[in-house]
Image: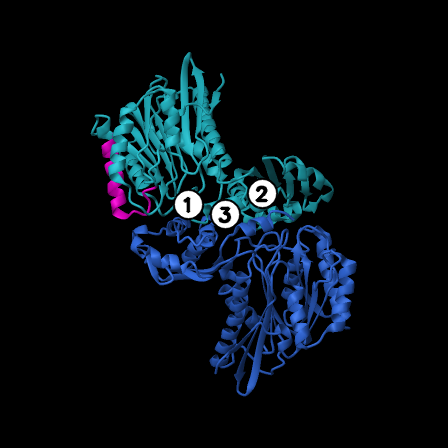
Chain colours: A blue, B cyan
Amino acid sequence: MSIVITQDSPGISDVPGFRVGATSCDIRNKGVERLDLMLIVADQPCAAAGVFTTNDVKAAPVRFSQKILAASADKIRGIFGNSGNANACTSQQGDLDAALIAKLSAEAIGAPDAAFLVCSTGRIGELMPMPKVASGIAAAAKRLSCEAIEGTRSAEAILTSDTRPKTVTARFVWQGQTITLAGIAKGAGMIEPNMATMLAFVVTDAAVAPAYLKSALKSASDQSFNCVSVDGDMSTNDTVILLASGASGVSVDESAESALRDLFQAALDQVCFILAEKIVGDGEKITKVVAVEIEGAKSRGDAEKIARAIGNSLLVKSSWFGEDPNWGRLADAAGYARVGLDENQLDIFYNEIPAVLAGRPLPENKPQWKQVVKAARFAVRLNLHQGEGKFRLLAADLTDGYVNYNKSE
Amino acid sequence: MSIVITQDSPGISDVPGFRVGATSCDIRNKGVERLDLMLIVADQPCAAAGVFTTNDVKAAPVRFSQKILAASADKIRGIFGNSGNANACTSQQGDLDAALIAKLSAEAIGAPDAAFLVCSTGRIGELMPMPKVASGIAAAAKRLSCEAIEGTRSAEAILTSDTRPKTVTARFVWQGQTITLAGIAKGAGMIEPNMATMLAFVVTDAAVAPAYLKSALKSASDQSFNCVSVDGDMSTNDTVILLASGASGVSVDESAESALRDLFQAALDQVCFILAEKIVGDGEKITKVVAVEIEGAKSRGDAEKIARAIGNSLLVKSSWFGEDPNWGRLADAAGYARVGLDENQLDIFYNEIPAVLAGRPLPENKPQWKQVVKAARFAVRLNLHQGEGKFRLLAADLTDGYVNYNKSE
């Protein structure tokens, strides 16, 4: 029994029980044709789960979707998504607009009482252009289909400064029945100027109750979306949604065989991890993806603190850009995570090449580790020798291109 | 009774009871004449206090100086300082070298049992070139004087990527007697490639016992050196030292009149604050110094968290560089400090111009706040309306020049 992964798949349209439709309605008000609005619609109300930004400043659609999920996680009919405007910091009008978008989406599919989730990404602090959005919803609803082309278009419609759509499909067979999971995502980090957000939508045709779905999604997110960092900025709109149509007829819940449960979780983990990797790999103006692997910490929490200190250090990130294997900056950043590391026990590796062992620099290895950092992807690994705590963060370099790209609106 | 501040003064040599000497001994091994080693020597053993990095990875001289201060804070004879090598991540040999440096310094002034503090800044992970350092100590000791030129030279000797020396002198009169405080500093942030450190040395001719001196320095540092950020990276070597010679004959302690104690503290606060401001203003390749003023938080700690989230956000700092008054990024960064702010109560100002009041954007003010951010110095101010907590952080912008400067050794 194995899981088959298709990278850069059509995405949502791969999964029985769902249709998608995307359109361009000029939410950015730039007068150019660009896909910027999409609907994912389940054939029947279905189970849903979400993971949201923990930022104190949550965009209106985040607040709205959290409320809908709290009340109706067993009967969500679909997801509205748009790029170009985040509907964040938009005060009470933003809340009214998010609710109206959900209502318009439900009406557009002829089910006025259906529950829709709403996800937006784009500029902060500007009201949604509601007349455009309303006509966009109607247009997207007319296009709803399960054809691959519409899947691809919907993955494009949520992009902001991303350079390419991000999709993946996972399939496995259980007792003769194929179960499919597919996901689409848009870039992490605070992406475009004034832009917010990582968005990911994953759907499956397994039948999964909301509580089980939520814990499965939480677990997958903790090992994927929560382990990547482009610029360390957490947005107002970060959202991951998982819908389960049940169209396969295969139930995954506490009473299912553990082999099935394991397969489902592994497939979900892979979908989320691949989307997260694509997000880092397409980070703004980056040239390197670096895995920061911490081991031997007293706890996973300690390991995570060190990984984030390293992965978000301007000096470390600048040195990655310069292909400069500067282990002193790694040690320094690890130290200011202040988990009580002992530098006399610290090992530092570039891939498998040791740069420091038990606190002692190995300058004779420098030619080798200088080679390691020339690759577009490599790992830095620190072992603290203090316990069993581990954490792996996918991070990116910091480039002059990033600064110049983000310096103005 | 007022305090007279002299910016860009000769520094240490302004203060009775101290002599300084600086020399160049090619610690960087580049074969160029550059001041890189200095001694500050008190005429008599004197009281001392220090504030040090809280990084888990402390350089050998930090560990050494902490140990000396713990044992002999009432009889410190002087400070050794150098640039070019941080003596950090240098294992046991680093500790031996720091101790030997102190011993050589004491011997060089003919007082082999005298206690010296040791402060180093520069490259991480390389052993000190001890023969060069030894000859440098001898040369600096020969130059010891209280002339202004030697004060200026000593301020230069601790610089790394700083573009100018940082000095200040404060004087006030108490019952006919002048009390002087003077300080020198070098740049904050992790400055040069592989470089560490903020260093500041302050001396006074007041007579102050070590315990009082320590609490006075702690208080001054908390409002100065601990309220600045260039790149958010805390170094392995950050050190602030305060020596009190007593040469003025005026005692400042718990039993002194409160007016005298207040004057001394105010003078010390100003010396530290001015040095901290100079450090930010000379941050690597910066173009803006921005005061991030948080008020109305539930506590000072909450206000500090928000100020640091804003002051260290790559997106915020990039937008300052671009003179782009992007308040959405301020709100977003404030939100991910996660102190429980309510965006519907949030005010955001650029200097005195409101951009957001009670969560409501004021786009009509944009022409005015766009003017504010064109200045080399301005303030962003957030009021949370949740309490009395305040914090003010001096931060800098992030430039393409910073990334390119730091991308390689």
Q: Are marks 1 and 3 on the same chain?
A: yes
| Nearest to the observer: residue A340 or residue B101 | B101
Q: Is residue A269 above or below residue A28?
A: below
> Which of the 4 quarters of the picture holds residue A11?
bottom right
Amino acid type of the residue tagged 1 in the rendering = Pro
Residue B51 horizontal/vertical position (percent): 38, 36
Q: Is residue B91 part of the magenta span, yes or no? A: yes
Residue A397 horizontal/vertical position (percent): 49, 55
Q: Residues within 10 Å of mark 1 (few under 14, many from 20)?
A: many
A383 with respect to A272 (left or right):
left
Residue topped by disc 2: B321
Amino acid type of the residue tagged 2 in the rendering = Phe
Residue under mark 2: which chain is it in?
B
Residue under mark 1: which chain is it in?
B
Q: Which mark is residue B403?
A: 3
Q: Is residue A148 above or below residue A51?
A: below
Residue topped by disc 1: B193
Q: Residues within 10 Å of mark 2 (few under 14, many from 20)?
A: many
Structural distance between the alpha carbons of marks 1 and 3: 11 Å
B150 with respect to A190 (left or right):
left
Magenta highlight range: B86-105
A67 with respect to B247 (left or right):
right
**Is mark 1 in CB contact (under 8 Å) with mark 3?**
no
Q: Are marks 2 and 1 on the same chain?
A: yes
